[in-house]
Amino acid sequence: MIVKFKTRQLETCYRQYRKANKTFGEQIACKYIQRIDIIQQSQNLDELMKLPGLRCHPLKGEKKGQYAINLTGFYRLIFKHSGTLLEIVMIEEVSKHYGD
């Protein structure tokens, strides 16, 4: 899949580990980069949803139409998926689940 980032900061964090580490912390930075690599290597959303460690799932409520992938603990990577032939994933945010 082709990955596009919603913000320049999210893209910079993917391309530069030091920036990701400073922004998210070491553990989340590693998982963030790793998860985006996995998304890029996936053929489609169904393949991502079948990978058990990612816990990829659709979101509800105000985030309906978006998906989440587990990073660590409460943190998750939120993205949108669109397209049929050419699949594009837009990385939305890294958030702390439930605001705890």
Image (tube, rainbow, N blue to C red):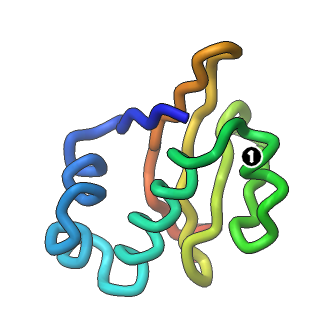
Quarter of the image with the C terminus in it: bottom right
Towards the viewer: 42 or 15: 42
Q: Is residue 64 shown above or below 27?
A: above
Amino acid carrying label 1: it is: Leu
What is the tally of numbered marks visible in this picture? 1
Q: 47 left or right of 85? A: right
Q: 86 left or right of 16? A: right
Task: Residue at 46%, 67% (x, y): give it.
Answer: 34
Task: Residue at 65%, 54% (x, y): give it.
Answer: 68
Task: Residue at 64%, 16% (x, y): give it.
Answer: 83
Q: 98 left or right of 3? A: right
Q: Is residue 16 shown above or below 25?
A: above
Quarter of the image with the N terminus in it: top right
Q: Is residue 91 shown above or below 32?
A: above
Task: Residue at 49%, 62% (x, y): give it.
Answer: 95
Towards the viewer: 45 or 5: 45
The percent position of residue 35, horizontal first and vertical second, equals 52, 62
Towards the viewer: 72 or 98: 72
Q: Quadrant of residue 71?
A: bottom right
The percent position of residue 97, horizontal first and vertical second, equals 61, 68
Per the image, the residue denoted by label 1 is 59
Q: Quadrant of residue 64?
A: top right
- At mark 1, the secondary structure is loop
The percent position of residue 77, horizontal first and vertical second, equals 53, 58
**Is the residue marked by circle 1 packed among few (<14), some (14-19), or many (20+) residues within 10 Å?**
some
Q: 83 left or right of 36? A: right
The percent position of residue 17, horizontal first and vertical second, equals 22, 70
